[in-house]
Amino acid sequence: MDKDQKFVITINRELGSGGRTIGRKLAEKMNVAFYDKALINELKKKFQLDTEQIEKLKSGKSDWWRDFINSAMFMGQGMNEMWYYQRMTGQEAYLVTSSDMFKVEKEILLNVASEASCIIAGRSGFSVFADHPNHLSIFIQAPLEHRIQRIMGKQNLTHEEAEKIIKKVDEMRESYVKKYTGTSRYDTRNYDLVINMEGKSEDDAVELILDYIG
């Protein structure tokens, strides 16, 4: 990846690994926009988009995607880890995503990345941007106990509650990725860089990524 050209970095991660926070911190370090799944979902709702509407917008107002991005950044400022976690582990997170909604999300991501360099945390980013000419794909993982302890500390949950949520989200994300990309999110061939967070802080991971980029 050439950081001096327009780029996109995608971060897939296990719940409780700290991947979203790593993405946000990396974006701050590199002075680029950061997007995640929860934010894209909120934008889909706000603009009530479907694939036909996106095509009309793309062929119409030329700066619509920039307006979209500005709205995303404004919304992102009010998001915190607790809100994101609740969204990801709430009932809505387990609803089956339709093929149309996947297409909408893919269109949103591709057009957002076409505007400016950015970092995207999401389950299918490695696939969405597989053909992007300047793309870095990262996977953040951690041992189960590391993830449980992190979720327990952040959400004041019991060990059993945290483990149950992690396993359920793992199943949901893997099912989603297999359905829409035809591969497993655990297949390391999908990534340029895989980081195991055992014994590492989020800042350590950010520095590893920056060193890798060079």
Image: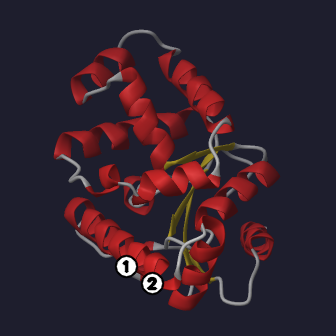
213 left or right of 74? right
Nearer to us in this view, 12 or 117 = 12
Residue at the far top in the pictured view: 61
User: How many labels sit on residues?
Assistant: 2
Task: Say which residue label 1 marks.
Answer: 167
**Real-space Cα separation, disc 2 to disc 1, in angstroms:** 11 Å
Of the numbered discs 2 and 1, the one sitting upstream in the chain is 2
Task: Say which residue label 2 marks.
Answer: 160
Residue drawn 37% across the image and 29% down it = 45
Amino acid bearing label 2: Glu
Q: Quadrant of residue 16?
A: bottom right
Q: Is residue 140 above or below residue 71?
A: below
x, y percentage for residue 188? Answer: 44, 82
Q: Which mark is residue 27?
A: none
Residue drawn 57% across the image and 22% down it = 66
65 left or right of 213? left
Report whether residue 99 is seen: yes
Q: Is residue 131 above or below residue 63?
A: below
Secondary structure category for the residue under label 2: helix
* Mark 2 or 1, closer to the camera: 2
x, y percentage for residue 127? Answer: 37, 60
84 left or right of 97? right
Q: Label 2: how many residues lie within 10 Å, few (<14), some (14-19) or many (20+)? A: few
Q: Is residue 212 above or below residue 85?
A: below
x, y percentage for residue 9? Answer: 59, 56
Q: In the rendered image, which quarter contains the N terminus?
A: bottom right
Amino acid bearing label 1: Lys
Residue drawn 45% across the image and 31% down it = 43
Residue drawn 46% across the image and 57% down it = 122
